[in-house]
Amino acid sequence: MQVTLIETAIPEVLLIETVRFEDDRGFFMESFHKEAFEELGIPVNYVQENHSLSRNGVIRGIHYQDMTAPIGKLVRCTVGKILDVAVDLRVGSPTFGKYVKTILSEENNQLLYLPEGFGHAFLSMADRTEIQYKCTAYYSPSSERTLLWNDSKIGIEWGIPNPSVSPKDNKGQTLDEYLKDPAFIYGE
């Protein structure tokens, strides 16, 4: 499997590009190859894979699981297009509160890896967007947390005036509230 790592502004967040083979019948692409990922230092200990569908203008997140069940994710867009965002939640990290954002689409053959200690959010940019993401831990409702998608301290530029956001995501913590009882400490 041919895999290219593309640097992001936060070294622990990895943008991964794979190769797609196309002809008049369609295409073939390997989206995961354990040995190739291990050689590049990308974790491969996935225990669950999720698949979601979102309509155009939907924002989901900023989601994470606390230290009782921390979770890393390998995200790819299989249909449509998303603006994918990873937020550093590790207090004491040089990039704490900062984020990486990138476009993932069914055409660009890219995946985003977010390690434990990062929040995840995305904006659907197509009428029908499907994402699949592998997880390093099982979903744990009691560990699930949400940061406010439009928190001014984080300052994500979504580029959309009136997104569709769930009531739960609209009630997420601010970064200041998170700091009162942080889930992640850098280096621990």
Image (spheres, rainbow, N blue to C red):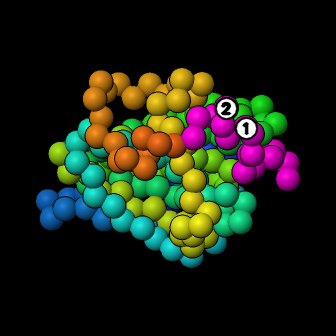
Q: Position of residue 94 (x, y in %)?
A: 77, 31
| Front position in the image: 91 or 170 | 170
Q: Position of residue 164 (x, y in %)?
A: 28, 40
Quarter holding residue 152: top right
Residue 98 vs 38, above or below: the answer is: above
Q: Is residue 154 left or right of residue 23?
A: right
Residue found 43% across the figure and 50% down from its top: 168
Q: Which residue is mark 1?
A: 179
Q: Which of 173 and 76 lies nearest the eye of the viewer?
A: 173
Looking at the picture, how far across and down is residue 126, in whole percent?
22, 43
Residue drawn where x is 35% and y is 25% of the image: 159
Compared with 140, 169 (above or below) is above
The crowding category of the residue bearing disc 1, from other C-alpha atoms within 10 Å (few below 14, some 14 to 19, many at least 20), is few
Q: Which residues are magenta?
A: 173-188
Compare residues 178 and 75 and report the one nearer the observer. 178
Task: Give the labeled residue for mark 2.
Answer: 176
Q: Residue at x 58, y 47 (%)?
A: 119
Task: Decide if residue 31 is on the left or right side of residue 33.
Answer: left
Q: How many marks?
A: 2
- Residue 124, how many percent across, how many down? 30, 43
Contact between marks 1 and 2 (CB within 8 A): the answer is yes
Asked if residue 181 lies in the magenta stretch, the reply is yes
Name the amino acid, label 1: Leu
- Outermost residue on the right side: it is 188
> How far apart are the alpha carbons under marks 1 and 2?
5 Å
